[in-house]
Image: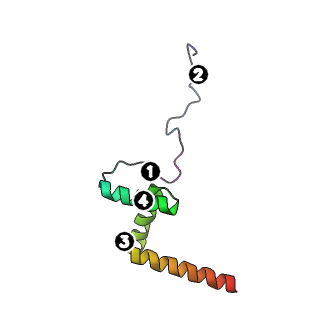
């Protein structure tokens, strides 16, 4: 280690650039986190990504992402894909 470092070109701020996400601390019930982790693992994504998607959907539609809504979305996507393949 050097006895002295030149920090005149140094900048204050985060070492890791912000990519549109903010780290927060939040208290969520254990059963909720476990449910998100289980669903996320089944879908092959991270549970935080699934929480983000659920919150975003709830904000934009005013509806929570429940099984019925998820099934409707999947049906619409399958139908849309089927129509594109047939065309």
Crowding near the residue tagged with mark 3, few <14, some 14–19, many ≥20 C-alpha atoms within 10 Å: some
Which residue does the image show at 44% across and 55% down from the upper left?
48
SS at mark 1 in the image = loop
The percent position of residue 54, horizontal first and vertical second, equals 42, 65
Please identify the quadrant where the C terminus is shown. bottom right
Q: Earlier in the sequence, mark 4 or mark 3?
A: 4
Read off the residue under disc 4: 38
The residues bearing labels 4 and 3 have C-alpha atoms spaced at a distance of 18 Å
**Residue at the outermost right position:** 87
Q: Is residue 45 above or below residue 23?
A: below
Which of 22/9 is in front? 22
Q: Is residue 83 above or below residue 9?
A: below
Which residue does the image show at 53% across and 41% down from the upper left?
16
Read off the residue under disc 3: 64
SS at mark 2 in the image = loop
71 magenta-colored: no
SS at mark 3 in the image = loop
The percent position of residue 53, horizontal first and vertical second, equals 46, 64
Which residue does the image show at 44% across and 50% down from the upper left?
22
- The mark closer to the camera, 1 or 3, is 3
- The mark closer to the camera, 4 or 2, is 4
Q: Quadrant of residue 10?
A: top right
Read off the residue under disc 1: 22
The stretch of residues the image draws in magenta is 16-21
């Amino acid at each position: 280690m050097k006895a002295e470092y030149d920090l005149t070109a140094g900048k204050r701020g985060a070492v890791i650039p912000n990519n549109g996400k903010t780290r927060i601390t939040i208290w969520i019930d254990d059963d909720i986190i476990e449910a998100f982790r289980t669903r996320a693992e089944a879908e092959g994504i991270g549970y935080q990504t699934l929480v983000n998607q659920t919150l975003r959907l709830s904000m934009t539609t005013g509806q929570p992402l429940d099984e019925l809504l998820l099934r409707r979305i999947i049906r619409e996507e399958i139908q849309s894909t089927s129509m594109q393949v047939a065309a």
